[in-house]
């Protein structure tokens, strides 16, 4: 990728905003829309969650810098008396489509996207910044972080902090020996159940039937999750976004593919 | 099927240096030491070396033993390690009553307080559980199957501990995390309910122990780490109560120390029963640091630094007995290269931890001479082996153990070019041993 890549990696959001306004020199940003051009941020669809890449990880949830992610809500670094915390997490957020759709649906809710791929994370960062500039007051409640959510969820979120978790079109890891790399598994559901408050909802969708069955089976057999009823699914405005809000979802729709959803609620385990 | 291991950089053909371990029977009826694949037990009650009986073919363990433990009631003993076997022994007959196969190398073991379950953790972060219901001390060898109970995703689990009240099982890993999980009524169905995460360490967590008294029966967790600190935790909430920078506070840092030097890792810690003291082994100290834990104030402080004089002795493992007020330590290693003797072990004992000496300010720990320790020379001959090892070999051993621990647990930092090179040459094929 170009030299711009390294430059943006090092900047904080504030500096990036300044740089964004001076986009004459930046070929990665479209002159007409002010938004970053996806083709400069292409990355392979797969990333190995087993490799210990070196990105900073907060030591604990209290070390997450809210003023960096949501400057509008946290003007200073001093967050001591703030009760506002991130409530929605998009795991493997890709190019950020879902976050942007949710941003206007829940304008007072803080949300974060977690993405393993470096370039894709940078793209989402720039996209959010550009949208904040283009639409003053909007999109201040969404942000992205580069991290491995299979290892570091407890570092970002306190027990029961989240009310929604999203797993849209996760990597299927087709080979049986790679099934353990799947982002939904019985063991990992323990950690997701930890981060989700009772009543919180986990949303999963895929266009790979076998993966859809796998995720559903994992959730069904886990004592801390219970399926939403058809009625509840219909009443939830978020459910429709699962297949339409993201690039991946739109691609599936274009190709006339089928999708497989599993939406579950976090419950108290039976004694 | 093994993927390329995370802790690579090592030639697969190289046999790793393994630290010697020690464990003491709760009522000090026996003492066990492991050096590499050898398990050596001395019966203090009868005053003689123990001959282990194992009906499986070949030596008891075929590769380095990485974890040993006595059960709380003293009836059982567990050993496990790199040969992917977990062996459960009866401490009465010293027969191996049960062998459990693990898919991966085992890094930690724990026994539930009621003696009904054995939990073991493997190198890829899965904690397994075996129920001992149908296992009888007198029965012949039974091969049990273990069930997966919980996992730390792709992380080496360094320590497993049950809480004193048996409600929780605590697991620590090399990704700086400590997870506290509710131990369920049916552990074979999985332990899904996470009580808390104890987060705060800035390097791998190497060891765990519980401090509890009759006044605080639920106990407090203490952890040691590669970041050179010992921390005190409330496991119900996961909150960090106190941090003790052991190396600094104990005055172990040299005045002309370079800033780039790695901190010395805490290699092992154990609680001294019946008093709120913790014995801490740290890589830089030839001896042991005794910390005092104030349970009402919830703080840790240095009580004493006990140096072992007259020889190079950096403990690789230490355990205290419940009844006799003694702290047993071993320093040793196996698979050491470059010397006549590949394996060596040295056992030392510190006394003075009697119930009457509850005030950590007053008590004076005494390092016992060889002829003063229970079991005397006979015990030392059995547990140390009968070779006489030179000083310089012990020095080399200490260095080797330090390097091995670092290679295993510290995440390697690669430059971008090196990382790309490694990705290109990565080979997921199973290596032929």
Image (cartoon, coloured by chain):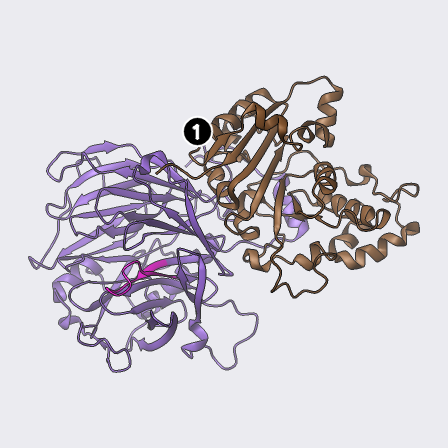
Chain colours: A brown, B purple
Q: Which residue lies furthest to the left in this view?
A: B46
Q: Where is residue B117 in the image (x, y as percent from the top left)?
A: 26, 42
Residue nearest the observer in this picture, B319 or B345: B319
Q: Where is residue A143 in the image (x, y as percent from the top left)?
A: 70, 48
- Give me the chain letter of mark 1: A
The relative height of residue B332 versus residue B426 in the rendered view (above or below) is: below
Residue B215 part of the magenta-drawn span: yes
Residue nearest the observer in this picture, A271 or A49: A271
Q: Position of residue B114 (x, y in %)?
A: 21, 47
Residue B210 part of the magenta-drawn span: yes
Pointer 1 local density, CA inside 10 Å: few below 14, some 14–19, many at least 20: few
Secondary structure at numbered mark 1: helix
The stretch of residues the image draws in magenta is B208-222
Q: Position of residue A26 (x, y in %)?
A: 88, 49
Work out which quarter of the rendered image holds the C terminus of chain B and state it: top left
Residue at coordinates 76% horizontally, 44% vertically from top-left? A123
Residue at coordinates 43% horizontally, 44% vertically from top-left? B125
Judged left or right of residue B306, residue B133 is left
Residue at coordinates 74% horizontally, 26% vertically from top-left? A250
Residue A134 visible in the shown view: yes
Work out which quarter of the rendered image holds the N terminus of chain B and state it: top left
Residue nearest the observer in this picture, B339 or B268: B268
Judged left or right of residue A139, residue B82 is left
The relative height of residue B365 versus residue A147 in the rendered view (above or below) is: below
Which residue, given by chain and number where applicable, does mark 1 sit on? A221
């Amino acid at each position: 990728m170009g030299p711009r890549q390294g430059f943006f990696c090092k900047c904080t959001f504030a500096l990036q905003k300044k740089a964004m306004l001076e986009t004459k020199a930046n070929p990665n940003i479209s002159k007409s829309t002010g938004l970053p051009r996806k083709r400069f941020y292409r990355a392979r669809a797969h990333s190995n969650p087993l490799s210990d890449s070196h990105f900073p990880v907060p030591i604990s949830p209290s070390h997450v810098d809210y003023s960096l992610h949501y400057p509008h809500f946290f003007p200073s670094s001093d967050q001591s008396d703030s009760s506002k915390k991130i409530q929605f997490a998009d795991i493997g957020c890709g190019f950020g489509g879902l976050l942007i759709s949710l941003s206007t649906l829940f304008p007072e809710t803080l949300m974060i996207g977690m993405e393993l791929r470096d370039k894709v994370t940078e793209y989402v960062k720039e996209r959010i910044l550009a949208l904040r500039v283009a639409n003053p007051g909007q999109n201040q409640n969404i942000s992205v972080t580069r991290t491995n959510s299979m290892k570091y969820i407890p570092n970002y979120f306190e027990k029961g902090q989240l009310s929604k978790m999203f797993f849209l079109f996760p990597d299927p890891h087709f080979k049986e020996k790679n099934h353990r790399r799947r982002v939904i598994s019985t063991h990992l559901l323990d950690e997701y159940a930890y981060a989700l408050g009772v009543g919180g909802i986990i949303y999963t969708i895929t266009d790979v039937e076998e993966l859809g069955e796998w995720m559903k089976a994992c959730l069904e057999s886990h004592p801390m999750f219970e399926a939403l009823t058809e009625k509840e699914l219909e009443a939830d405005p978020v459910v429709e976004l699962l297949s339409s809000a993201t690039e991946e979802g739109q691609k599936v729709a274009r190709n006339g593919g089928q999708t497989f959803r599993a939406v579950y609620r976090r419950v108290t385990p039976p004694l | 099927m093994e993927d390329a291991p995370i802790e690579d950089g090592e030639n697969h053909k190289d046999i790793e240096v393994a630290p010697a371990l020690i464990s003491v029977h709760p009522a000090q009826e026996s003492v066990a030491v492991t050096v590499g694949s050898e398990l050596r037990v001395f019966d203090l009650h009868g005053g003689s070396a123990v001959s282990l009986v194992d009906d499986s073919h070949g030596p008891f363990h075929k590769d380095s033993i990485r974890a040993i433990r006595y059960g709380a009631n003293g009836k059982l003993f567990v050993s496990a390690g790199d040969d992917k076997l977990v062996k459960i022994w009866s401490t009465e007959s010293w027969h191996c009553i049960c062998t459990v196969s693990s898919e991966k190398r085992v890094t930690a073991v724990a026994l539930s307080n009621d003696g009904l379950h054995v939990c073991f953790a493997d190198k890829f972060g899965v904690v397994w559980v075996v129920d001992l219901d149908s296992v009888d001390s007198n029965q012949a060898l039974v091969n049990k199957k273990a069930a997966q109970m919980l996992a730390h995703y792709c992380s080496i689990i360094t320590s497993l501990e049950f809480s004193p009240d048996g409600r929780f099982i605590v697991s620590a890993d090399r990704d700086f995390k400590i997870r506290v999980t509710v131990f369920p009524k049916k552990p074979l169905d999985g332990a899904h309910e996470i009580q808390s995460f104890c987060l705060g360490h800035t390097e791998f967590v190497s060891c765990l122990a519980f401090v509890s008294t009759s006044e605080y029966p639920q106990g407090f967790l203490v952890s040691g780490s590669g970041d050179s600190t010992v921390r005190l935790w409330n496991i119900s909430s996961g909150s960090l109560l106190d941090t003790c920078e052991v190396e600094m506070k104990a005055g172990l840092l040299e005045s002309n120390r370079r800033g780039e030097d790695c901190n010395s890792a805490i290699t092992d810690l154990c609680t001294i029963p019946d008093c709120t003291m913790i014995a801490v082994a740290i890589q830089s100290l030839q001896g042991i640091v005794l910390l005092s834990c104030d349970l009402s104030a919830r703080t840790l402080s240095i009580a004493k630094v006990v140096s072992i004089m007259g020889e190079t002795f950096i403990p690789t493992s230490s355990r205290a007995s419940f009844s006799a007020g003694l702290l047993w330590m071993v320093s040793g290693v196996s698979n050491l290269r470059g010397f006549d003797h590949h394996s060596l072990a040295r056992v030392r004992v510190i006394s003075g931890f009697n119930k009457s000496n509850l005030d950590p300010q007053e008590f004076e720990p005494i390092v016992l001479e060889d002829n003063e320790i229970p079991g005397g020379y006979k015990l030392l001959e059995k547990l140390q082996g009968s070779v006489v090892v030179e000083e310089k070999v012990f020095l080399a051993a200490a260095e080797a153990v330090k390097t091995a621990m670092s290679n295993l647990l510290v995440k390697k930092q690669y430059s971008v070019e090196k990382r790309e090179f490694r990705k290109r040459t990565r080979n997921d094929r199973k290596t032929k041993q």
